[in-house]
Image (spheres, grey):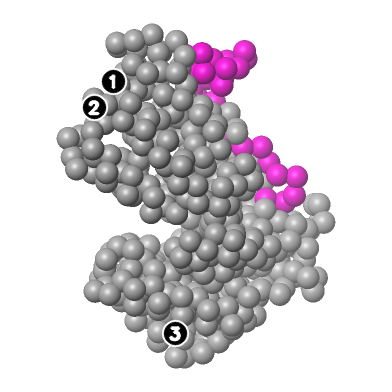
């Protein structure tokens, strides 16, 4: 765990410490934990910018590309080109690439490059811009040394929109060429570096355009946007029947629709998700299809199958933060929380600006592994940032369990008294929800419920 992560967690824990100390001596326990976590050297000053250490191999973040037209309707293209480059570079051996979802944090505001490099823990940044006008395309790309801001390589591509794929291929090759000279990362000419580049992607410009539009719509997590994205992907697959990446994305959209109740028949939606995932996998060995099928296997309580599928995804794409998160969660639910912890830590390292779902998984894995201090810290951070009601609720409940495990009985009761008077906080509802997580060891859930009952929660 990095110093930056410790500082974030300790700041959130302070909120719990104050609450607990109002009525009991439990704050002594928490204060002791805080001191141990910081260490004798003490915490760094607030103004000091500290991030994770640089990997031993070349490291890179592909920042969101500029929408040169400044047209909101064209944002999908600039975001999509950057995301595609991130995926293609991330599949290369000998290179550490930050997940695009974390790089998106810099879409609106962009601090100094050195700050971004430190925050993400990378040595280089790839940035650029895209402009499309009347069938013509302009793409700018620039590789920068994060610590110094020095431009290592840059180029401007100006031609017909059909040359998009050639431009992307050249950017990938040039970036790899620049980074290869430093520590021997694989180059575009290395046969082992290119197995994922052909089948999952497309060479059809219209299909690619539809895919990028669908990805942008999918980020909104809205029912109407999800339905429109589904239509775009179906059309893209009609244009390119071997577009495995579009098939996998379509499967994920159906899964999202099923889990959020956007379709009348959830079982049908789950069936469609699995069908598209298998079709994608039959077309190309694509990580997103494997993680989708792993998620669906977990739904059927096929723990071994879920783990095996996620392991295949990680083997194909070691920089795939979502695949690592899926593997960690599958291992944890299978009763292997100890094995899951380092996998989840790598997922979080690849995606420093993790989504709240990943932060929740990390906290739960610590709880399943009996790492009470880390679990309490994780749930405290999660409570401070979660916006989803279910995750916010579980963060509060996880705090109570963690405090009890650390001996703070009266402090846990104080925290329990602050919970909303809602049926969602009734023990019966909580137990049902936690069982639906799919943890193979049901006794663990029973123990957590017993602890909540001890803190004063009612049926």
Assess whether mark 1 and mark 2 are in contact (beta carbons under 8 angstroms). yes
In which quadrant is the C terminus drawn? Answer: top left
Q: Secondary structure at mark 2?
A: loop
Residue 126 figure quarter: bottom right
Assess whether mark 2 and mark 3 are in contact (beta carbons under 8 angstroms). no
Residue for badge 2:
418
Q: Is residue 175 magenta?
A: no
Residue for badge 1:
414
Residue 84 figure quarter: bottom right
Residue for badge 3:
236
Q: Earlier in the sequence, mark 3 or mark 2?
A: 3
Q: Nearer the viewer, residue 180 or 24?
A: 24
Q: Secondary structure at mark 3?
A: helix
Q: Is residue 212 visible?
A: no
Q: Is residue 290 left or right of residue 353?
A: right
Q: How far apart, in angstroms, are the residues tagged by discs 3 and 2?
A: 50 Å
Q: Nearer the viewer, residue 289 or 220?
A: 289
- Residue at (63, 75) in percent of width and height: 285
Q: Is residue 431 visible?
A: yes
- Residue at (63, 57) in percent of width and height: 319
**Label 1 crowd (10 A; few <14 / some 14-19 / many >=20):** many
Q: Is residue 90 left or right of residue 33?
A: right
Residue 9 rendering spot, x and y as whole percentages: 47, 29
- Span colored in magenta: 31-59
């Amino acid at each position: 765990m990095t110093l930056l992560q410790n500082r974030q967690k300790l700041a959130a824990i302070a909120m719990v410490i104050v609450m607990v100390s109002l009525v009991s001596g439990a704050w002594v326990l928490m204060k002791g934990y805080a001191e141990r976590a910081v260490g004798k050297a003490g915490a760094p000053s607030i103004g000091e910018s500290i991030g994770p250490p640089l990997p031993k191999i070349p490291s890179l973040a592909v920042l969101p590309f500029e929408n040169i037209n400044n047209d909101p309707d064209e944002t999908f293209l600039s975001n999509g080109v950057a995301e595609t480059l991130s995926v293609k570079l991330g599949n290369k051996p000998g290179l550490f690439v930050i997940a695009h979802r974390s790089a998106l944090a810099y879409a609106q505001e962009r601090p100094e490059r050195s700050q971004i490099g430190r925050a993400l823990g990378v040595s280089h940044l790839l940035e650029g811009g895209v402009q499309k006008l009347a069938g013509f395309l302009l793409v700018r790309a620039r590789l920068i040394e994060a610590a110094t801001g020095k431009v290592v390589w840059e180029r401007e591509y100006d031609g017909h929109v059909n040359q998009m794929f050639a431009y992307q291929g050249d950017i990938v090759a040039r970036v790899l060429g620049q980074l290869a000279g430093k520590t021997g990362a694989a180059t575009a000419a290395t046969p082992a570096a290119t197995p994922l580049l052909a089948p999952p992607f497309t060479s059809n410009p219209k299909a690619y355009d539809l895919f990028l539009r669908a990805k942008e719509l999918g980020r909104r997590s809205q029912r109407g946007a999800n339905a429109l994205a589904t239509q775009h992907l179906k059309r893209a697959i009609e244009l390119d029947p071997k577009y495995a990446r579009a098939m996998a994305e379509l499967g994920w959209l159906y899964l999202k629709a099923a889990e959020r109740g956007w379709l009348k028949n959830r079982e049908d939606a789950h069936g469609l998700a699995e069908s598209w995932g298998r079709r994608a996998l039959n077309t190309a060995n694509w990580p997103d299809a494997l993680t989708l099928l792993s998620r669906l296997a977990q739904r059927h309580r096929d723990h071994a199958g879920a783990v095996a599928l996620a392991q295949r995804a990680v083997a194909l794409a070691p920089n795939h933060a979502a695949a690592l998160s899926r593997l960690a969660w599958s291992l944890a639910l299978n009763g292997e929380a100890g094995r899951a912890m380092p996998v989840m830590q790598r997922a979080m390292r690849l995606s420093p600006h993790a989504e709240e779902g990943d932060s929740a998984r990390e906290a739960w894995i610590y709880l399943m592994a009996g790492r009470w201090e880390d679990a309490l810290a994780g749930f405290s951070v999660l409570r401070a940032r979660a916006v989803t009601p279910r995750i916010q609720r579980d963060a509060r409940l996880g705090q109570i369990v963690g405090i009890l495990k650390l001996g703070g009985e009266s402090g846990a009761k104080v925290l329990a008294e602050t919970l909303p008077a809602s049926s969602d906080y009734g023990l019966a509802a909580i137990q049902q929800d936690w069982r639906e997580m799919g943890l193979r060891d049901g006794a663990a859930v029973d123990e957590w419920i017993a602890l909540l009952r001890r803190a004063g929660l009612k049926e």
